[in-house]
Image: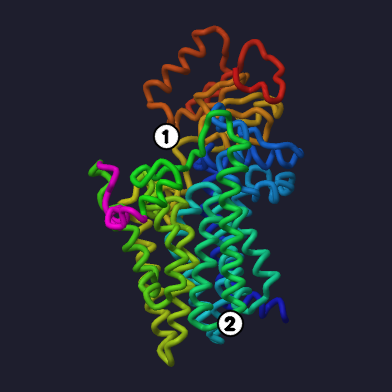
Amino acid sequence: MKKIQLLNNPLTIIFVFFASLYASISLVNHYNFRTFGWDLGINNNAIFDYAHFRWNDCMIMQPAFDNVLSDHFSLYPIIVSPFYWIFGSWTMLIFQIVAILFGGFGIYRFVRRISDNEWLARLAVLHFFTIWGIFSALSFDYHDNVVATMFVPWFLDYFEQKKWKQSILFFILIMIAKENMALWAVFIGLGLALRAALNKDRKKLIFSLGLSFLALVYFVLVIKVFIPSLATPGRDYLHNSFNALGSNFGEVLINIVKHPIRTIELLFVNHHGDAAYDGIKAETYLALILAGGFALILAPEYFIMIIPIVAQKMFNDLPIRWGISVHYSIEFAPILVLALYAVIHRFGKRKIQIASLCLSVSVISSISFLDHRTSEYYNKENSQFYKKAHWIRDFDVSEVRHALDKIPADARVSAQSHLCPHLAMREFIFHYPFIGNANYIALLPKEGNKYPLDEKSYDQKIEEFISSGDWEYLVNRKSIIILKKKKLELGKRNSSVN
């Protein structure tokens, strides 16, 4: 009887439905070779190395990096790596989906506790699960900030209950995801400090300020000590990409203070200069408002929490980060929903109607953004789970999978981006056209995206390999080409770059 009641529980139905929906986006993309070397392949190779009790030498990012932690200092792959033995190349995608569902339950707990209203909490979960940022993130591989974001509702819920041990645990889990998550954690703490000060809650004020200070110290250590100590000699931190304000974080902070008008202007204008990127920032702000961002005016503590997220997007050199595509907006999802429902629950008898209206507007806007958006690099086939094009490819997927099985597990492989995540569970894997000391090359000629090559140079390189006399076809089909070096050589670890 209890099992039947559980299956009929509206909350259970919601979670089962969205688990299936998310799998139909993320896992179907992976099955259909719509995941990429950057970034799922990188993460897959990392967990492969960690599962074998060694540091990851970042094969797919060579020759730029010798250690994946010198790119982003993320500890999640280390924690998750044992599951590689069970789920293989699907591990990080499954971990990400589970994390999103976990975050949704955190939303439910938070709203249920502050409102004491079951229906309002369910509406909050639906609002969270249907927000555009989640669909965008799921359409593009795995990213640590997606998982970290899902711990935020849990941290806030335990903080409000003054359960300090649990609060510290989830705060640490947020910080260790990635260096910019530690910076975000600083502002999450400051937002809570503001609310504690307004409520004259001394314990929460001291605790929240202490957490902010902890996150700031960790951020500085990662940027100034940990990453430089692991980086390739002569290579600076890769993600100082805010040249409109300064060449490093110090200059950025100084110029924000010295030039406040210019700083505010950069939040809204296309500072890239190319007219093709006009409207991207405006679209993001529209998406925020339609998803409930207007509530931030009445919940200033949450407004403080989104400041670093807005800043790292809009000040960035790369227009793709200004917009709502891929994973660059995921951090907004829990903050917008929690702020909105923290405001809505203050209303009287009309709060369910107001929440239903806000949910409807958010859902309609999310569907609209799935069909069309201004933001750069939007791949409809990866996102539109409700269209046939998402479920099929213009080549035989099973034929490609069968061909990949012919590559020995100990082979050294250079693979096209879409093949990298499937071939990354090995010691030597490179992102084509970098060859290193690979003795196999795996290519997907029917894939339209030949990044970083164009169509002409892509075809020329294949001809060059064959005409050199050093390579031969192992597989030569329209859907997949695998080249094998005629004279196979045994490789040694850390000898990957010739």
What's under tag 2, amino acid-wise?
A: Arg
Question: As displayed, is residue 449 above or below residue 196?
Answer: above
Task: Say whether residue 495 is magenta.
Answer: no
Task: Say whether residue 266 is magenta.
Answer: yes
The outermost residue toward the right is 53
Q: Which residue is rendered at x = 49% and y = 38% of the image?
A: 238
Q: Which residues are magenta?
A: 257-273
Separation of marks 1 and 2 at Cα, in angstroms: 48 Å
Q: Taking 60 as reference, is 266 left or right?
A: left
What's under tag 1, amino acid-wise?
A: Asn
Can you say which quadrant of the picture contains the N terminus? bottom right
Residue on which disc 2 sits: 113
Whether residue 356 is visible to the viewer of this picture, yes or no, is yes
Q: Position of residue 63 (x, y in %)?
A: 55, 26
Which of the 4 image quarters holds residue 105?
Answer: bottom right
Q: Which residue is rendered at x = 33% and y = 53% of the image?
A: 258
- Provide the secondary structure element on which disc 2 rests: helix
Whether residue 104 is visible to the viewer of this picture, yes or no, is no
Q: Position of residue 409 (x, y in %)?
A: 70, 29
- Local crowd at mark 2 within 10 Å, few (<14), some, or many (≥20)? some
Q: Which residue is rendered at x = 57% and y = 13% of the image?
A: 471
**Numbered badge on residue 449:** 1
The outermost residue toward the left is 275
Question: As displayed, is residue 266 above or below residue 8?
Answer: above
Closer to the camera in the image, 27 or 490: 490
**Numbered badge on residue 123:** none
- Local crowd at mark 1 within 10 Å, few (<14), some, or many (≥20)? some
- Provide the secondary structure element on which disc 1 rests: loop
